[in-house]
Image (tube, rainbow, N blue to C red):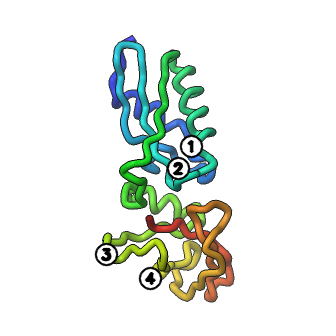
Amino acid sequence: MTVSKEKILEYLTEVKDPEIPVLDIVEMGIVRDIVVHNETLKIDITPTYSGCPAMKLIEDQIIAELHKKGFDDITINTVMSPAWTTDWMSEKTKQKLKSYGIAPPGRLSDDEFDPLNYVDKEVDCPFCESNETELKSEFGSTACKSLYYCNNCCQPFEHFKCH
């Protein structure tokens, strides 16, 4: 079976992020590289957070999806460098987050990002777009999200952290 890297990438759009099911692992930027050699596939993935508990499930879902497409010889490598960044997410992907009720990450330059003293400049509510919001917890339902509260529409919401 001859297949292109682009076709494998298309197949992988069927694998949804288990923590944010409106996004797939390709648009999240988790899929870093695909090597097709004869009938062997090697896929590099990068976690959105070091120690992300969803990575094993994502790996299993990749293998299951590609098995459905007729591939048996699949190697998944977890690549930690370069570290995943929210800058790998397109504006369209960030809009999907917002429509799902999660405030999307902004963009930070290297000199603005200090992981030991990090606070987003401003987080707009994904429901009413007000910037009258306040951080309630550095961690939401997952380590890659923080919990906010909107003082305008009185809705709690999660924010996908910039990193």
Q: How crowded is mark 4: few (under 14 residues within 10 Å), some or many (20 or more)?
A: few
* Image position of 46 with respect to 43: above or below: below
Q: Mark 3 points at which residue?
A: 111
Q: Do the residues labelled 4 and 2 touch (CB within 8 Å)?
A: no
Q: Mark 4 points at which residue?
A: 121
Q: Which residue is drawn at 53% across and 69% down?
A: 103
Q: Do the residues labelled 3 and 1 touch (CB within 8 Å)?
A: no
Viewer-side residue, 73 vs 156: 73
Q: Position of residue 24 (x, y in %)?
A: 51, 45
Q: Are marks 2 and 1 in contact (CB under 8 Å)?
A: yes
Q: How crowded is mark 3: few (under 14 residues within 10 Å), some or many (20 or more)?
A: few
Which-is-in-front pick, marks 4 and 1? 4
Number of marks in picture: 4
Q: Which of marks 3 and 4 is nearer the N terminus?
A: 3
Q: Which residue is drawn at 50% across and 58% down?
A: 96
Which-is-in-front pick, marks 4 and 2? 4
Q: Earlier in the sequence, mark 4 or mark 2?
A: 2
Q: Earlier in the sequence, mark 4 or mark 1?
A: 1
Q: What is the three-letter code of the residue carrying label 2?
A: Leu
Q: Name the residue under label 2.
A: 23
Residue 85's disc is none
Which-is-in-front pick, marks 3 and 1? 3
Which-is-in-front pick, marks 2 and 3? 3
**Spatial CA span between label 3 and label 4:** 14 Å
Q: Which residue is drawn at 58% across and 74% down?
A: 127
